[in-house]
Amino acid sequence: MPLPSVIIEPLVRAALLEDLGRAGDITTDAIVPAGLVAETALVARQAGVVAGLDLAAMAFRLIDPAIVVEVARPDGSRLAPGDVIATLRGPARGLLTAERTALNFLCHLSGIASATAAVVAAVRGHRARITCTRKTMPGLRAVEKYALRVGGGSNHRFGLDDAVLIKDNHVAIAGGVRAALERARAGVGHLVKIELEVDTLAQLEEALALGVDAVLLDNMTPAQLAEAVAMVGGRAITEASGRITPATAPAVAASGVDLISIGWLTHSVAVLDIGLDYRG
């Protein structure tokens, strides 16, 4: 489902204000006549999955409400090079002023959706779902996690306040797995899920004895993951993480884990090349 406008508008508005600076688009205003109307198209330069059209369209409309956006390939559509994603008609000044902001959102989010779709395809046939992490760009978490969903992935927690994830530093400061789990269980409500990161099978055995909702199996080999899944035996959700790529994901998924979390899908993914072409 698309994100509500109340979530995306502040992001788009802030990006436009950053670009407009103190004097607006002095290049376009000097070159393009005020009354000129033009038609442009958002065109894919490479294959992928489109995401972020609502943000792109909002960028144009915030600059000039007279711009009309006709979507040909909505979010989630598979793209081939040369595919027209949307056609835009309206004041030429507005089209050019909003162009970069619109493309920044569209290319970045389509890059996330495309990369996610590639990993999802790589693990097809296994039960593992591909999830994101909190490794998102500041201010863009909601839309980056949305783009990952568009690509066929699932979302991990959205912030520090919607689930407990006990990591190695929590365990070290608490003085051990038992202390960390007991304090977490005593400190949160009965509806809050608790996940524990484990690096070894010994830690996993201790966690299972104490009881957890999910275990994060960090930087384990596929063989270790398979052994961990067997140890868990359905008593907790199993999540694999740690430098997983489309090439290594199939072996990880074959271990039987429920989830594969991948941070680079949001924090360092390559953009999908999309351009704005003038049609007349």
Image (cartoon, rainbow, N blue to C red):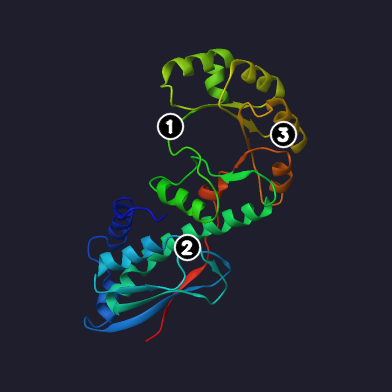
The local crowd at label 1, few if under 14, some if 14 to 19, many if 20 or more residues have their Cα within 10 Å, is few
SS of the residue under disc 2: helix
Give amino acid for label 3. Answer: Leu
The residue where tag 1 is placed is: 160
Q: Position of residue 133 (x, y in %)?
A: 52, 41
Is residue 105 toward the left or the right of residue 260 in the image? left
Q: Tell me what residue is drawn at x 52 percent, y 67 percent.
A: 273
**Furthest residue toward bottom:** 280
* Front label number (1 vs 2): 1
SS of the residue under disc 3: helix
Quadrant position of the C terminus in the picture: bottom left
**Gap between marks 1 and 2, in whole Å?**
28 Å
Mark 2 vs 3: CB contact within 8 A: no
Q: Position of residue 146 (x, y in %)?
A: 45, 51
* Front label number (2 vs 3): 3
**Gap between marks 3 and 1, in whole Å?**
26 Å
The local crowd at label 3, few if under 14, some if 14 to 19, many if 20 or more residues have their Cα within 10 Å, is many
Q: Which residue is more in the foreground, 51 or 229?
A: 229
Give amino acid for label 2. Answer: Cys
Q: Which mark is residue 225?
A: 3
SS of the residue under disc 1: loop
The residue where tag 2 is placed is: 107
Q: Is residue 176 visible?
A: no
* Front label number (3 vs 1): 3
Say whether disc 3 or disc 1 marks the residue closer to the N-terminus: 1
